[in-house]
Amino acid sequence: MAGIVKRQRIAGCVKSQRGAEESAVAKWLLIGGAIAFCLVFLLLPLANVFVQAGAKGSAGYWRAISHPDAWAAMKLTLWIAAISVPLNLLFGLAAAWAIAKFEFRGKALLITLIDLPFSVSPVVAGLMFVVLFGLQGYFGAWLRDHGLQVIFAVPGMVLATVFVTFPFVARELIPAMQATGSDQEHAALALGASGWQTFWHVTLPSARWGLLYGVILCNARAMGEFGAVRVVSGNIAGKTQTMPLRVESLNEEFHGQAAFAVASLLALLALVTLAFKTFLEWRQRREFVLAQQAAAGELSVVSPPSSAGGRPAATKGTRKHA
Amino acid sequence: MRIIWSLLLLGMAVGVDAGDIKLLNVSYDPTRELYQDYNAAFAKYWKAKTGDTVKIEQSHGGSGKQTRAVVEGLDADVVTLALAYDIDAIARQAGLLPVRWQERLPYNSAPYTSTIVFLVRHGNPKRIKDWEDLVKPGVAVVPANPKTSGGARWAYLAAWGSALKRSGGDETAAREFVRKLYNQAPILDTGARGATISFVQRGIGDVLIVWENEAHLVLREFGAEKFELVLPSISILAEPPVAVVDQNVRRHGTAAVAKAYLEYLYSAEGQAIAAKNFYRPRQGSAARLAAQFPPLERFTLAELFGDWQRVHRIHFVEGGVFDQLQQPSR
């Protein structure tokens, strides 16, 4: 089975090289350029965060990340992500389903609206909420009279985060759902499944990788968001400071190492997220390969002479890994 | 739907934990260290006096930005800002406290004072001794933007006032001096702390025009062997004021403790903490004052400029003097 995978890969490589026959110099210049770019602009700053965080010894590092305000910032960051990601998941799923599988009036408008948070600067997004819910804004006085605090409190920070991370799930899901088309759904409906059953057993499983990928991206942005959240947070240490805000505040207090210590935690969260994403992609690819083999196996039943020996092995392999 | 609401409610509950009384002090940039010390001292004092535990929360940022936030509903019990103009704005625009708030506490509601000084690199390579030296060719000065930073407003007025004093009240000379000065600024940060970081950590410029307390703090944090504080011959009496935000404390039921919090700043202990953090106390032992704060001639805002409303209208309003000075060269 492994042999088949390898052979397919090699075949793919040979094919792609034929289309781009460049001199060795050009090839290595391009590759070298890309690697150097990644090193200087991605790896170096990231490594620097960890180097700076540990620059003055581990005692300072632990003091920085065990400070009550740092703990509060971590808790708040995770909470805000835990609230806004599910909200965007629900919304993104509904929107992507509607857009990918149905035709309706106003579809183009909906797609534009979903993209809106990408084109609005986060700081402007934050200001929008201040204008809406601030004391001088439209709902501010009413909210205050009813004892509700939105801006400069956690609800406002959640709102800002939801707004900024709004497009991620939908944007990942729409292409995934469009790619599968709606033939399977039609088939399910024709076979007597209800709309809900069709969604649950046909649409969702085929789009689950896009969904997971969108959720991961959404989560990464939710935890790292700075501009929009800063405008609505009021920056109260230990209360409305998320980790990015805590980093800024520590830096302004001349606590460089502490700032980098908290930043390193944030970077670690991002790395874990990325690792998880890579793992999912790896699994997705493997599943795809296995499915192809399974399909090849099924086909071979129809035409026994060509792969009489290969079929049972492939099927066995599929079972083992499934 | 119920799940969403309970999640939201949980989210709101995150920030709220046990504790008897909470007080939110919304302050400006350089007071972080001062109020860290003072909050601990006041909590102890209040516990001994009333038996109540009080937890003081802090929010710091540029004075103007913090003002905006309180006007828009940041729930401050007390504000301790860089200049009276900002607290005036809270009174006028949001009506959260009476317009005559400044009469409620001694010394114009400013329990400590400061001034504007120069911070130069070790050895003072550009030989900066006084205000005139700042506009010598080849000197890069680092002020903050007076349109956004409270400390930078004091610095702007200190520069203007010093030129007035030198020229015997010649407004044209003052205007020319200030124009030259800001044209020698390679950058204009939006906040006092930002300007300090540019000068100290990013190595920009030859001289930082800065709060006296901030200059001392830099010497303490980064070592006196790297920077030197230069006291000009004359500067401004900067009075960072404090006030209770009446509407908010009424809603929170914290009026008494908020008032006591500010009044205790005038006590012997409060004044000592201010002095320890390089703010000039209003009262205290003369010996301590002389050692840490050399005598310096300081003119007041009222003496040269009138009041903040007038200063704002002339200098900092859109298209005002500061904007006009920026135009020809930029």
Image: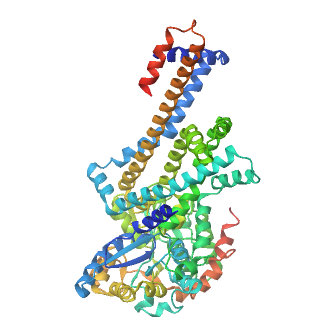
Measured as percent of width and height from the top left, residue B249 is found at: 43, 85
Q: Residue at x 31, y 82 (%)?
A: B270
Residue nearer the viewer, A109 or A28: A109
* Above or below, comparing residue A308 to residue B215 in the picture: above
* Above or below, comparing residue B134 to residue A142 in the picture: above
Measured as percent of width and height from the top left, residue B56 is found at: 35, 76
Furthest residue to the front?
Answer: A192
Way the structure is coloured: rainbow
Residue nearer the viewer, B34 or B211: B34
The C terminus of chain A: image quadrant: top left
User: Can I make out residue A63 in this image?
Assistant: yes
Measured as percent of width and height from the top left, residue A133 is found at: 58, 73
* Above or below, comparing residue A228 to residue A176 in the picture: below
* Above or below, comparing residue A289 to residue A55 in the picture: above
Horizontal side, residue B128 vs residue A193: left or right: left
**Quarter of the view holding residue B171:** bottom right
Furthest residue to the left?
Answer: B48
Q: Residue at x 38, y 88 (%)?
A: B259
Horizontal side, residue B161 vs residue B329: left or right: left
Instruction: State how many labels appear.
Output: 0
Q: Residue at x 48, y 90 (%)?
A: B102
Measured as percent of width and height from the top left, residue A185 is found at: 65, 39
Residue nearer the viewer, B11 or B321: B11
**Quarter of the view holding residue B175:** bottom right
User: Can I make out residue A3 in this image?
Assistant: no
Furthest residue to the top?
Answer: A305
